[in-house]
């Protein structure tokens, strides 16, 4: 923005409202990237450093489905959810399940997994950037009054809201949800009433991985597909989860809050400076409230 | 025997808390486990549920060996557990706490059994209240209701009257008696109130230092036995 001067001097209402709408879009991007991480961290206490790479796998699975099988983009989104969910299931069975009681080791192990996934992808697909074709209506933009927004951003927003609502129903209105929340609160009591915590953790991890895959599938509509793309999403995802406190509602609030602040600061200054201010604010916030916005008061394993 | 233990030793870490422990309880009976604090009564309950670090020896429910089964499998054999401190999930509503019990039902019917609400009218009127807000006595009612939602053959009750106002102690004693005599649910309970134990129990088991030191029909629980193993 405003080349030469750091701060914009003239305030413009329509541009500001555009910035707010863009903030909502940034929020939905960060939130959809963070949802899988939230669920895995919130329910199983696993800090999944390979989360960004699961997003990357979602993008590559969409790319492969599209180029090798000719499947239309919108159909690739649920399919990527299933594919990366299955990869997550496998990962949980062969590695993560042995590490639930050792949080530090999980971080190291999942970091190792992320390196393996990056290099593996590089071997299979090469390190050149890939592009996913999106349908015509997603490459344009929509004008409502003086608000101008790319249609792909609207799609991401709609999908994010839909996924949040679906997750809310899953966690608060289904039998599986009661099981997950019971295991999170009191593992021994859950087991004493027939809940198989191993199976709950497994399903939760697979669901979280699947959500990462879904995020990757939808985000590659506006990003270049690269083996290292996961790193771009890991930091905002962790921000959202940590500020939110690990609960679903917390992540939604944190996603909207940080996305909007980023966009508002960017309106007054520029993207880089906005991120700098945002990070400082988050550090201060976490100093005052380390448990995050909506910390579940349940005990951590 | 509905539930029996044969020479069971149960450990936390490397320390044996229950040693060479054998007993059995017949279907429809009520067995009271007595003993001072810290002699292993709670560990006995946790051993049956598979919540100690390790145990050796045979534990059987209805003739089925469960010594090697994980906790969630044992629960599904019809064991309703009311732990010490009640183990209520405070973030859950009353309804969700009772529904948790239904996961261990053989038929997996996801609804609150009618008997839970009939016995505890307070719970019926407060199904959507957060369980963390209940009083001690109400939490104990909820813990019993949750264990009943399992549709249990046997209830394991760890100090059901602990920390409860005296007037409600009697009420809970009456409820347990009804469950035992009218619904035919076998009870295994640890109890500090000798009077409650005498009124409820068909048999007793005296535990000291992790071992069975006396046992038999409640009539044989003489003052001499009480003096030797219960008075401090």
Image: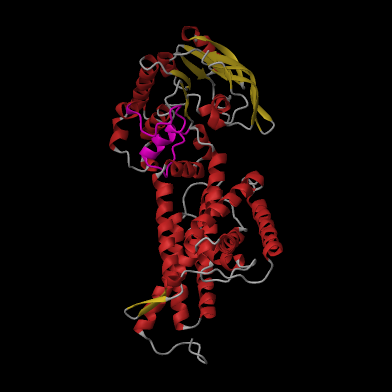
Residue at 44 percent of width and 42 percent of height: A178
Q: Which of B85 and B129 is in front in this view?
A: B129
Residue A30 x %, y %:
50, 66
Residue B62 x %, y %:
53, 16
Q: Is residue A194 left or right of residue A12?
A: right
Residue B93 forms part of the magenta stretch: yes
Against A84, residue B119 (above or below) is: above
Q: Nearer the viewer, residue A63 or A170?
A: A63
Colouring chosen for the image of the structure? secondary structure
Against A35, residue A17 (above or below) is: below
Against B120, residue A278 (above or below) is: below
Residue at 42 percent of width and 57 percent of height: A164
Q: Nearer the viewer, residue A135 or B216?
A: A135
Q: Nearer the viewer, residue B225 or A285?
A: A285
Residue B21 x %, y %:
62, 18
Q: Can residue B65 be seen in this view?
A: yes
Which quadrant holds the C terminus of chain B? top right
Residue A245 forms part of the magenta stretch: no
- Find residue B225 and report its image quarter: top right
Q: Is residue A288 visible?
A: no
Q: Which residue lies most toward the bottom here?
A: A4
Residue at 57 percent of width and 59 percent of height: A69
Against B91, residue B114 (above or below) is: above
- The region drawn magenta spans B85-114
- Find residue B166 and report its image quarter: top left
Residue A278 x %, y %:
50, 73
Q: Please identify the dominant SS of the magenta region.
A: loop
- Find residue B172 and report its image quarter: top left
């Amino acid at each position: 923005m405003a080349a030469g001067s750091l701060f914009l001097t003239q305030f413009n209402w329509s541009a500001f409202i555009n910035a707010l709408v863009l903030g909502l879009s940034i929020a939905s991007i960060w939130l959809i990237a963070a949802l899988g991480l939230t669920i895995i961290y919130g329910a199983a206490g696993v800090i999944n450093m390979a989360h960004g790479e699961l997003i990357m796998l979602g993008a590559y699975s969409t790319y492969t489905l599209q180029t090798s099988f000719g499947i239309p983009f919108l159909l690739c989104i649920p399919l990527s959810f299933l594919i990366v969910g299955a990869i997550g299931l496998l990962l949980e069975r062969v590695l993560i399940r042995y590490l639930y009681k050792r949080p530090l080791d999980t971080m190291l192990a999942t970091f190792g997994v992320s390196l393996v996934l990056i290099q593996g992808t590089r071997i299979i697909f090469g390190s050149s950037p890939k592009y996913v074709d999106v349908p015509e209506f997603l490459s344009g933009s929509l004008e409502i009054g003086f608000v101008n927004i790319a249609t792909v951003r609207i799609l991401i927003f709609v999908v994010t809201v839909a996924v949040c609502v679906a997750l809310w129903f899953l966690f608060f209105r289904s039998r599986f949800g009661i099981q997950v929340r019971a295991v999170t609160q009191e593992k021994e009591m859950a087991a004493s009433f027939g809940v198989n915590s191993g199976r709950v953790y497994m399903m939760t991890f697979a669901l979280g991985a699947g959500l990462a895959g879904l995020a990757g599938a939808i985000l590659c509509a506006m990003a270049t597909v690269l083996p290292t793309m996961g790193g771009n999403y890991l930091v905002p995802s962790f921000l959202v989860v940590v500020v939110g406190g690990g609960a679903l509602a917390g992540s939604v609030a944190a996603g909207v809050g940080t996305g909007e602040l980023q966009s508002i600061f960017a309106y007054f200054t520029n993207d880089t400076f906005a991120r700098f201010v945002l990070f400082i604010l988050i550090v201060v916030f976490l100093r005052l409230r380390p448990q995050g916005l909506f910390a579940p008061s349940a005990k951590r394993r | 025997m509905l539930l029996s233990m044969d020479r069971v030793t149960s450990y936390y870490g490397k320390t044996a808390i229950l040693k060479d422990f054998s007993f059995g309880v017949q279907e429809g009976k009520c067995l009271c486990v007595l003993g001072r604090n810290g002699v292993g009564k709670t560990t006995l309950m946790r051993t049956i549920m598979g919540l100690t670090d390790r145990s050796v020896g045979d534990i059987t429910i209805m003739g089925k060996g469960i010594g090697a089964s994980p906790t969630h499998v044992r629960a599904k054999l019809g064991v309703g557990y009311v732990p010490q401190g009640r183990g209520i999930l405070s973030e859950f509503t009353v309804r969700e706490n009772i529904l948790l019990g239904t996961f261990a039902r053989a038929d997996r019917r996801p609804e609150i059994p009618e008997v839970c609400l009939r016995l505890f009218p307070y719970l019926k009127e407060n199904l959507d209240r957060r369980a963390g807000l209940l009083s001690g006595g109400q939490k104990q009612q909820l813990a019993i209701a949750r264990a009943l939602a399992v549709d249990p053959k046997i209830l394991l009750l760890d100090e059901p009257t602990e920390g409860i106002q005296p007037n409600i102690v009697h009420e809970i004693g009456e409820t347990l008696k009804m469950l035992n005599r009218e619904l035919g649910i076998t009870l295994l309970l640890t109890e500090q109130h000798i009077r409650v134990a005498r009124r409820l129990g068909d048999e007793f088991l005296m535990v000291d230092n992790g071992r069975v030191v006396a046992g038999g029909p409640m009539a044989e629980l003489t003052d001499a036995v009480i003096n030797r193993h219960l008075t401090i």
